[in-house]
Structures are given as C-alpha cells and as structure tokens.
Image (spheres, rainbow, N blue to C red):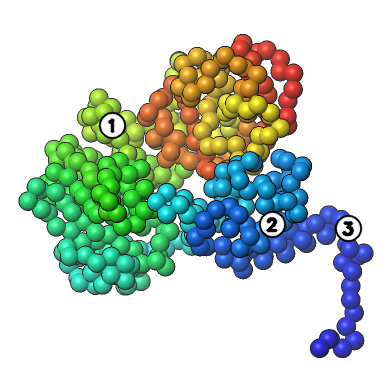
C-alpha cells in the first residue's frame, strides 16, 4: 500500500555533492548505533559476512590495494592486508572491544561502556555475594569477602579462604550487564591489599574465564595450565607490601596525582602492581616514590634527553616510529601502531635500533613515521609502565585506535639529516 498523493524527491537534484555526502555519513552513523556487532566469530570472513560489512571493508581497504572490489572481497580476508584482529577493530571503531581467545580460536566482540557506573567495593559476609557469583557463572565454596554495590544492589563480589600454606585463595564474579566499567581492576586491587593485610604469603585463584586469565597474567600474576584448568598465582612479600599499603593510604588524601591525564592513586597502584621491586633492584617504597614522582613532575627532560615526567603534558606532540616494509605504499595508514618515541635522533642510535629488533644492514626497507597526536590520544598508564622498563627509549604509548592529526612518512638514512628523496603526506 503506497502513500496517497506522495511526492518522490530526488535528493541528489536539490542538494550539493558535499551535502549529499554529509547526509549519507550521518545516516550511516545513526544506523551503526542501532546495529549490535557483539558476538563470537571464527575469523574475519565470518565477521564481515554475518554483519553485511562488505561495502565498509572495500571502502576502507581498497585504498591499500586497488584490486579489492565487492566482487572479490573474499580473496582479501586471509591476512594479505592486515591481521583479522586489526581489521575488525578498524571496521568497528572505538565503540567495541575485540578479544582473541587462543584456546577457542575465536574473536569475541563486546561493547564498550560509555556511561559511568557509580559503585563501591566493601567488605561483607553477606551470602548475596555467593548468589551473585553463581549468577555470573561461578560456583564458589569459599567465604564471602567483598561486595560490589550499585544502587543498593550487589552486582559483583569475591569469596576467599586462606589454606594451610598461608595462600589467599579467591573467586571473583561480576554480573554480565555490569562488566566493562573498570570494576575488575578495582576489585583485584582490593583483593591484593586484603591478602597483604591478612599477612598471606601469596594470592591464588582457579580461573575459568580466558579473558580474566589473560588480564591477570598481564598485570603480574603467574599463570599455569593443568589440562583444561587454569590457575593464577602471585607471591606477596608481607613486610614490603605493608609499607606500600600505607603509602597508598597517604596518597588517598590527594586522589588526583596527575591532572594532565586525571590519573589517580588507583592508577599508581596498578602501575606498581605490574612491577616486581626486587627485579628492579629497588625496594617497594623506592619504586612507589619513583613512579609517583614521574607522574607528578612536569613534562621535561634531563641533560641526556631522558623524559622526567608527564604532568602538564602538551596538548599536541610530535612522535616518531620506525617500521620495516618493502613497499611504503603498502603501509596501513589507518593503524600505524601504538609504540612511539619522543626524539627522532633515537632512530639513528644502534642500541635503539637493536632494541626493537632492527639493523642498519638494509636501510632500503626502513621508514620513519613522523606524526602529531593530541594529548587525549596518549595512554599515560602504559607510557609510564614502558618508561620503567627502558627510560632511554623515551617511549610514548598511544591508544590502539589513535589516528594522528597529521603525519608524514620518509625513508630512513644511515646519517641523521640526509635529505629524503620521497615523502608521503
């Protein structure tokens, strides 16, 4: 049934080309908000095909390979123009998280939470914690310990017991609809501090969730696998850790410790947790103070050009990255990478080149990306962690999906200052 007396309007005839392109873009953005891409996918082909993203894929990647069309797109999803994970992230944009599960060999796509959830983590022996863990898929035989409360509702929590070896065993769970708000990081911090306060020698858990296993092993837990069962374990040096706990409590009186990036004591605690002070040849107190000073010191350099701090970070900054590629036209300009250096001269240093696995033996394949980023594109936490590992690299880490405001690509020559023959803007 049609509309009576309806008039068909050809928008192309009454709009300029720019207006028409803008309208198409606006409609596309609105439609993307209505589509839900969350789910599990075996590979890039399944992701594109099941979500009807063939046109978007061709539009984005035909710039890298002019042979790519809607008719032959299936021939270009086997790794020729980028990894499956990188391409999926690029197609989705910043609204989704993409996680590759090695065990199941699948990609898991979840939505990022944009609304800020108000919650608190409190000590509690309420059995509602047990029910919450069961609702999140975890059956725990331990005692209730922490509850995550939002709007007077228990949305997550943990249980524990200390075994005969003085090890703090725990289970943890967060209801699915409340995941993605940063609760996990905060409750793990609470568990570690609780174990130290109870003078446990170590903290341990059996983990059934692969994403949780990867997260915990990335922040300093040792991981082990026994058949289908995964465990995480972390040694605790009670005397030193108690000092750290006291220092953290003192810092709570001044919660924001870096105004440029709104970093709090929780971020400081997380950075500390990723490092073993004994490996750094420092005690826990010195390590804590060193990281705190780096976060509080103004953006500046010492006489050797090493970065001293990231407070009052510039609104825009020029960074450099070195890559090896046979053909610069094949460089994926939508994803340059996240590891950058502050000083171009680093790229001509043999130690720096060797540290990133490259050599000057064949400079024909080495190219420099010089890019300008905004302060909001810098991952200050990861920048600080990498600074601890090697301060002479002066690494600045960007967020994974950060795209430079401006960039140029030039060929690397053995001597700094040689005029490049070709430049890509």
Mark 3 and mark 1 lie on one chain; the one further toward the N terminus is 3
For residue 245, side relative to residue 344 (left or right)? left
**Can you give x and y, in whole percent of width and height, for residue 150 in the image?**
35, 68
Mark 2 and mark 3 lie on one chain; the one further toward the N terminus is 3
- Residue displayed at 41% across by 44% down: 263
Residue lying furthest right: 13
Instruction: Give the vertical position of 90 relative to 41 (above or below).
Output: above
In-front residue for pair 53/255: 53
| Residue where numbered disc 2 is placed | 54
Mark 1 and mark 2 lie on one chain; the one further toward the N terminus is 2
- Residue displayed at 43% across by 58% down: 180
Q: Quadrant of residue 32?
A: bottom right
- Residue displayed at 68% across by 48% down: 75
For residue 402, side relative to residue 110 (left or right)? right
Residue lying furthest left: 164
Residue lying furthest top: 415
Q: Residues within 10 Å of mark 3 (few under 14, many from 20)?
A: few
Asked if marks 3 and 1 touch (Cβ < 8 Å), the reply is no
Residue 287, numbered circle: 1
Q: CA distance from mark 2 to mark 3?
A: 27 Å
In-front residue for pair 187/44: 44
Q: CA distance from mark 3 to mark 1?
A: 61 Å
Q: Residues within 10 Å of mark 2 (few under 14, many from 20)?
A: some
**Can you give x and y, in whole percent of width and height, for residue 331 in the image?**
66, 34
**Can you give x and y, in whole percent of width and height, for residue 34 in the image?**
62, 68
Mark 2 or 3, which is nearer the eye?
2
Q: CA distance from mark 1 to mark 2?
A: 50 Å
Classify mark 2: helix, strand or loop: helix
How many numbered callouts? Answer: 3
| Residue where numbered disc 3 is placed | 16
Residue 109 visible in the shown view: no
Residue 204 visible in the shown view: yes
């Amino acid at each position: 049934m049609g509309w009576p007396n309806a008039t068909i309007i050809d928008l192309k005839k009454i709009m300029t080309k720019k207006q028409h392109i803008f309208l198409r873009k606006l409609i596309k953005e609105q439609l993307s908000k209505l589509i839900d891409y969350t789910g599990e996918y075996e590979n890039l082909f399944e992701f594109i095909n099941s979500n009807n993203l063939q046109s978007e894929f061709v539009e984005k990647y035909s710039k890298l390979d002019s042979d790519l069309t809607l008719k032959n797109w299936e021939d270009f999803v086997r790794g020729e123009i980028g990894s499956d994970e990188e391409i999926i992230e690029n197609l989705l944009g910043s609204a989704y998280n993409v996680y590759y599960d090695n065990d199941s060999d699948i990609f898991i796509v979840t939505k990022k939470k944009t609304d800020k959830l108000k919650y608190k983590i409190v000590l509690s022996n309420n059995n509602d914690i047990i029910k919450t863990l069961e609702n999140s898929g975890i059956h725990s035989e331990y005692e209730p310990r922490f509850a995550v409360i939002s709007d007077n509702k228990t949305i997550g929590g943990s249980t524990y017991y200390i075994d005969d070896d003085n090890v703090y065993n725990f289970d943890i769970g967060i209801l699915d609809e409340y995941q993605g708000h940063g609760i996990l990081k905060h409750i793990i911090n609470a568990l570690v501090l609780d174990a130290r306060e109870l003078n446990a020698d170590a903290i341990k858990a059996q983990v059934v969730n692969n994403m949780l296993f990867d997260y915990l092993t990335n922040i300093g837990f040792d991981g082990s696998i026994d058949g289908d069962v995964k465990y995480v374990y972390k040694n605790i040096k009670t005397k030193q850790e108690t000092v750290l706990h006291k220092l953290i409590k003192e810092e709570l009186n001044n919660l924001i410790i870096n105004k440029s990036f709104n970093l709090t004591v929780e971020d400081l605690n997380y950075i500390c947790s990723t490092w073993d002070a004994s490996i750094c040849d420092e005690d826990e107190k010195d390590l804590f103070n060193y990281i705190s000073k780096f976060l509080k010191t103004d953006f500046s350099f010492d006489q050797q050009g090493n970065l001293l701090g990231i407070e009052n970070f510039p609104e825009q900054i020029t960074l450099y990255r070195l890559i090896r590629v046979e053909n610069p036209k094949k460089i994926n300009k939508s994803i340059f990478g996240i590891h950058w250096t502050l000083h171009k001269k680093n790229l001509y240093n043999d130690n720096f080149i060797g540290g990133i696995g490259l050599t000057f033996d064949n400079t024909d394949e080495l190219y420099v990306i010089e890019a300008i980023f905004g302060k909001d594109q810098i991952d200050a936490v990861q920048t600080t962690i990498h600074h601890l590992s090697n301060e002479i690299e002066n690494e600045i880490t960007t967020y994974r999906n950060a795209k430079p405001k401006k960039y140029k690509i030039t060929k690397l020559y053995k001597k700094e200052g040689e005029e490049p023959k070709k430049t890509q803007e």
